[in-house]
Image: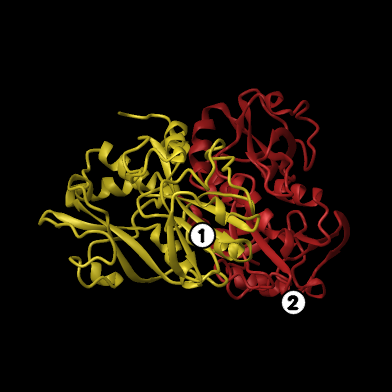
Chain colours: A yellow, B red
Amino acid sequence: MVYDSPSEIRELIRRGDLLRPTCGLALGYTQANLVILPKESSFDFFLFCQRNPKPCPILEVLEPGKYQPALSAPTADIRVDVPLYRVYQNGELISEERDITKYWSSELVSFLLGCSFTFEAALIKAGISLRHIDEGKNVTVYVTNIETIPAGIFSGPLVVTMRPIPTAKVVRAIQITSRFPGVHGAPVHIGEPEKIGITNLARPDYGDAVEIKDNEVPVFWACGVTPQAVALKSKPPLMITHSPGYMFITDLSDEDLSVL
Amino acid sequence: MVYDSPSEIRELIRRGDLLRPTCGLALGYTQANLVILPKESSFDFFLFCQRNPKPCPILEVLEPGKYQPALSAPTADIRVDVPLYRVYQNGELISEERDITKYWSSELVSFLLGCSFTFEAALIKAGISLRHIDEGKNVTVYVTNIETIPAGIFSGPLVVTMRPIPTAKVVRAIQITSRFPGVHGAPVHIGEPEKIGITNLARPDYGDAVEIKDNEVPVFWACGVTPQAVALKSKPPLMITHSPGYMFITDLSDEDLSVL
């Protein structure tokens, strides 16, 4: 069964009829990372995202208390339209929820940030297959020794995803992902993992390891885990995010986000 | 006498030895619009800029009370390094100043926004001459009937600049300015001024009118007057900007702002 429209899929999620990771749903439409923070830290977090657009590409920021993303999904309700949420208090995960209405208040500010599904679709369309997808694994994620640009109370290391790319296709992969700065964009590093503080490719910090073949180069892109990790480090009284892989599906088409 | 380095020029400005519009100074370095607002309205204004990146391309936002732009000009002091400022109270211009230190407080948030000088330099380098520059005039500015995307307390019409471009060079002009989304980027409209609410090209809302020849098309770009006009409409208790043409000179090179 294929559901094409983002609003139909969100409706199923809202009714509780679709509790699964959103990868592969609403193909061609942009999925988003969700970070919800109290108003008092939202200016600093906004600033952090603006200064670090590669790990934190802003799709939409909602005014305090607003839960309908007027620009990217006007009929949605971000309190109930994500299949699974994580709720943190003072930096500690306290529960996973399918509905965060009971936590809602006029003091909360929601950030929707681009996710790599968009540029992965573009890579696959261009004939560059991605091993973690072929093997049904989670994307490989490492914490680097590259510092993000701090903003107010927020600071921390850049987190990256890694995808093995055939040497002959590296330039093309850069060109393709450069068209999508709104969803992490061009890579931050190519080859030589030790140069960015990654000592053992076989032991990722998150996600699953994948083989890198002789004719392939590990290519690293900024990862949306970065803003979550940075925000958690500040131990906000309340912070709500999507659960990994359970993204918010917007009405934006992937091509809406392309430049040139 | 030619001063090449932005910091040398800012030093002269700071000493009071260079009270002139900054057009033509520090060629190749990015100049910026300055908007300073009280903390309580800064989140909404930040949101307005994020939602309207063509008229309001953010170069840097400073934390409340900070006056040194750590990313775009770390040795600068934005309270004294602009040749001429405008100070508004409750939406009314109350004075022009060469130094705004006496108005400063920890409650003020400074926004540096891209200005069209950067893409004009790129157009000229590509052999597309600009009439207002050739004739020593101010760029032609119109208020359109295109509404910006509102954010919090901020809303209002898009303001545009117009430059006559030879028909044969319109595509090239679009390509060149598309490379600089951080300084207004691609045009918002080409030809047919009445379609965006401009009824008489000979009577601009700001700046000077220029002739449009038979082989030329009027091309419209989003203008940095937009955020100032929108901010003033909200009548903030205090708002400080640069005076028109007296910009803040950053250490960023124009090419730092290019994509692809």
In the rendered structure, the answer to whether residue B168 lies left or right of residue A169 reads right
Amino acid type shown at disc 2 = Arg
Q: Position of residue B124 (x, y in %)?
A: 56, 45
Q: Residue at x 65, y 49 (%)?
A: B48
Q: Gap in Å between the C-alphas at discs 2 and 1? A: 36 Å
- The amino acid beneath tag 1 is Cys
| Vertical comparison of B19 with B165: above or below | below
Crowding at dot 1, Cα within 10 Å, few <14 / some 14-19 / many 20+, comes out as many
Looking at the image, which residue is at 39% across and 66% down? Answer: A158
Numbered tag placed on residue B185 in the rendering: none
Protein chain holding label 1: A
Q: Quadrant of the N terminus of chain B?
A: bottom right
- The answer to whether any part of residue A250 appears in the image is yes
Q: What residue does disc 1 label?
A: A49
Looking at the rendered structure, the secondary structure element under dot 1 is helix
Q: Which residue is mark 2?
A: B15
The residue closer to the viewer here, B77 or A144, is A144
Judge whether residue B260 can be spotted in this image: no
The one nearer the camera, A141 or A12, is A12
Instruction: For mark 2, give the secondary structure.
Output: loop
The image shows residue A25 at horizontal and vertical percentages of 35, 37
